[in-house]
Image (cartoon, rainbow, N blue to C red):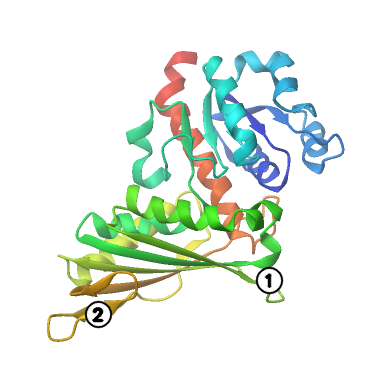
Amino acid sequence: MIKVAIIGSGNIGSDLMMKIRRGSERLKLAAMVGIDPESEGLAMARRHGVATTDRGLDGFLDMKEFADVRIVFDATSAHAHARHDEVLRLYGKQVIDLTPAAIGPYVVPVVNLDEHLAAPNLNLVTCGGQATIPVVAAISRIATVEYAEIVASIASRSAGPGTRANIDEFTRTTARGLEKVGGAGRGKAIIILNPAEPPMIMRDTIFTLSVGADEAAITSAVEAMVSKVQSYVPGYRLKQALQFEHYDMRNPLRVPGYGVFEGTRTTVFLEVEGAADYLPAYAGNLDIMTASAKAAGEHLAKSKFLEEVA
């Protein structure tokens, strides 16, 4: 078992804690780090026998558990993460970043984690990126994806102050992830906070403009990728069959901000239901981040650390 720590005792950190405690054969949570002595996350950690501190990173450095921790999950903020990363690198800790800081390379476990095993800091892009980049990557592996656009719709209740304060960062980071990890020539991202009651689960619509593969090949690639994501996010699924539209020189598609396109437009509809480990099931946008963090940590434990501590 590889010892890990979580910095950030809010909703995301608490959900990740429950995921690790309930179902990981490779990760052992050694410390929960927060800054609010009254936080529910720290109280819950103490009830489960996990060492805690409410003095943030400085308190973590003083804990006896610090020396044995191999992987640190940062579930705080982009601003706080900059210092956390700087300090943790000095001690050789592997960092998995759940904030928008993007100091390390963008990583989506099923797409490119193996390419970045040596990186000391891995960034999990955004919730929209974790949900949609796998689909774009699946198509780009068999066709040339010239453009990808995603619309992530999440329950307003599942968008906390951090999400609301970083909407612009979400769209920029997700768009870059569609390009850098998904393989799209150009990417665009939109997020919608849906105030519906009862709250709706996360839904994502993905549009790609591609050249070089037929409908059957695209459908097969997307379905295979969805199955891979489901291995760590069980509530991740296709909402309905893929839709296709074909354009040629006689009937080109004119896309605002992109231009004229000839080829295949594919539309993919996804939904992400949370596992309700700590957060409600409708908060699939947060669940996919914590599930991806756990999956990344387990793969690192298997590929990078197990021989070292065996």
Is disc 1 surrounded by few (<14), some (14 to 19) or many (20+) residues within 10 Å? some
The one of 58 and 53 positioned closer to us in this rendering = 58
Identify the amino acid type marked 1.
Answer: Pro
Query: Residue 234: horizontal and vertical position, in percent?
Result: 51, 56
The one of 90 and 132 positioned closer to us in this rendering = 90
The residue at the point 39 percent across, 55 percent down is 133
The residue at the point 46 percent across, 21 percent down is 305
> Which SS class for mark 2?
strand
Task: Give the mark nearest the N terminus, 2 or 1.
Answer: 1
- Please tell me whether residue 78 is drawn above or below residue 221 in the rendered image: above
Using the image, tell me which numbered label, if any, was put on residue 199. 1
- Please tell me whether residue 273 is drawn above or below residue 19 in the rendered image: below
Query: Residue 125: horizontal and vertical position, in percent?
Result: 48, 47
Q: Examine the rendering and report whether any part of residue 310 can be seen.
A: no
Q: Identify residue for label 2.
A: 253
Identify the amino acid type marked 2.
Answer: Leu
2 and 1 marks in contact (CB < 8 Å): no
